[in-house]
Image (cartoon, rainbow, N blue to C red):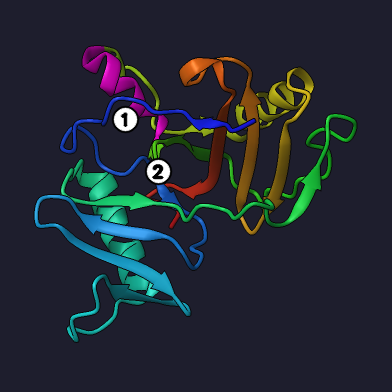
Amino acid sequence: MSAAVLSLPAPAPTLFPPPAVPSRFRDGDRYEWPTTGNVWLRRGGQWRPSPEDGSGWFTDQEVRHALIRAVADWDVGHRFEPGQPGPLLPGRRMTPQTGVRGVELYGVSSAAQYVLSGDRLVPVRDMVAAYDEDAAYDFPATVSTATMLDVVGTILAEHDRAHASYDSGRLYVRYQREGDGPQGYPVICLHVFLLSASPAEA
């Protein structure tokens, strides 16, 4: 049986800045300027333009400072998207039996939650805006790590085919919702929580 991917309305591209600055970057991450269409992908520890145009690369420090400014100044001209995991979630696996015990948060107290919409990971606040723009302004950009762990623990407890893992400052959860897709097929749901540094902490 095939599975559909949850498809949500496309969020308005200019409502919100990135929800937070990730505490760590990983290859596969995407940084873009939606107003110009410029995109950089992180490969080999460097941020390279996509498509490659010979204009040079960005460092993690340069992207971090750009995102810090965007968050602090409510600059909607920047967007960050975490790289998607492969078929196997990276890092230390969690199960309904083990739950989220042993996740090392390194003193970070908040996380930005992204969800799969079509083939892109979007911040939850942007997803809310696709349905109700006014409500989205009241929706927090980040959640506490306690809330994050509670959400992940609930998903693991309530879904038989839920898988979760923690790796390098990111917590991944993938599960199926039965019968919610086209023609009654199950829907694949993916949540990615990024441990986040506030502008003042980064």
The amino acid type found where label 1 is placed reads Asp
Q: Is residue 142 above or below residue 132?
A: below
Write down the quadrant of residue 130 in the picture.
top left
Magenta extent: 123-134
Q: Position of residue 104 (x, y in %)?
A: 74, 50
Q: Is residue 119 above or below residue 4?
A: below
Q: Position of residue 201 (x, y in %)?
A: 45, 53
Location of the N terminus by quadrant is top right
The amino acid type found where label 2 is placed reads Asp
Look at the image and tell me whether residue 137 can be seen: no
Q: Secondary structure at mark 1?
A: helix
Write down the quadrant of residue 3 in the picture.
top right
Q: Is residue 7 magenta?
A: no
Q: Is residue 129 magenta?
A: yes
> Badge 1: how crowded within 10 Å, few (<14), some, or many (20+)?
many
Q: Residue at x 9, y 57 (%)?
A: 36
Nearest-to-viewer mark from 2 and 1: 2
Instruction: Please give left or right for residue 144 compared with residue 70 in the image.
Output: right
Write down the quadrant of residue 8 in the picture.
top left
Disc on the earlier residue, 2 or 1: 2
Q: Position of residue 43 (x, y in %)?
A: 44, 75
The residue indicated by pointer 1 is 126
Q: Position of residue 126 (x, y in %)?
A: 31, 30
Q: Residue at x 88, y 35 (%)?
A: 98
Instruction: Please give left or right for residue 98 compared with residue 5 in the image.
Output: right
Between the C-alphas of marks 2 and 1, the distance is 15 Å
The residue indicated by pointer 2 is 119
Q: Secondary structure at mark 2?
A: loop
> Badge 2: how crowded within 10 Å, few (<14), some, or many (20+)?
few
Location of the C terminus by quadrant is bottom left
Q: State whether the magenta stretch is mostly helix, strand or loop.
A: helix
